[in-house]
Amino acid sequence: MDPQTCRTAVFISTVSISSSSQASGVTVSDEVIKVFNDMKVRKSSTSDEVKKRKKAVLFCLSDDKKKIVVEEGNQILVGDIGDSVDDPYACFVKLLPLNDCRYGLYDATYETKESKKEDLVFIFWAPEGAPLKSKMIYASSKDAIKKKFTGIKHEWQVNGLDDIQDRSTLAEKLGGNVVVSLEGRPL
């Protein structure tokens, strides 16, 4: 190989590495960050404040595809449980659109053989039926939202209802076979 060819090969390699690491340019709205912080921090609250706390919420791209925003109407409040929501996990699964991507936060309550726990789970929902363009934008924007969600222990990419309907799959993500119940329901 002559020196000119070597230089070209190195240049091409450098260009492809830098272009693949570029982000989508999508930003995260302040409201999304506020929702996350409210769900993450469990300060002592009155019973009315606890009822207003979000158990689950979905985030989507704005209409112009430039911002990640809270999806209006697609949330479950702690106060809804036992009232209008019998099973928060099943209700959350029903919020997911079958033909488009979303990000979600789910505040999982579960028990192991030793103790009761609560953890936030970040979910990247990319169903097989979603348009390719949507999957690409959501996938390339995922890091933007994850960087804002500091301290998340559990991340789950889900590609269809078969992957998420069975609560034991979430239990596996939370602690493997040591989880004995999720949302008060035995596994």
Image (cartoon, rainbow, N blue to C red):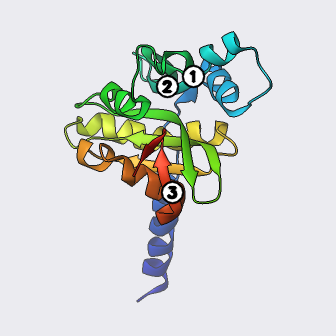
State the mark number for residue 54. 1
Q: Secondary structure at mark 1?
A: strand
Residue at 43 percent across and 29 percent down: it is: 88
In 3D space, how far apart are the residues under numbered discs 3 and 2 (Cα atoms)? 23 Å
Q: Residues within 10 Å of mark 3 (few under 14, many from 20)?
A: many
Residue under label 2, please give it: 57
Foreground of the two, 81 or 101: 81
**Residue 48 in the figure: left or right of residue 111:** right
- Which numbered marker is on residue 43? none
- Disc 2 to disc 1, how far (Cα)? 7 Å
Where is residue 30? Give x, y as percent: 65, 20
**SS class, disc 2:** strand
Does 52 sit above or below residue 27?
above
Q: Which mark is residue 179?
A: 3
The amino acid marked with disc number 3 is Val
Considering only order in the chain, which callout, 3 or 1, is on the residue closer to the N terminus?
Answer: 1
Q: First in sequence: mark 3 or mark 2?
A: 2
Identify the amino acid type marked 1: Lys
Tell me the distance, in whole angstroms, between the alpha carbons under discs 1 and 3: 23 Å
Q: Residue furthest left?
A: 129
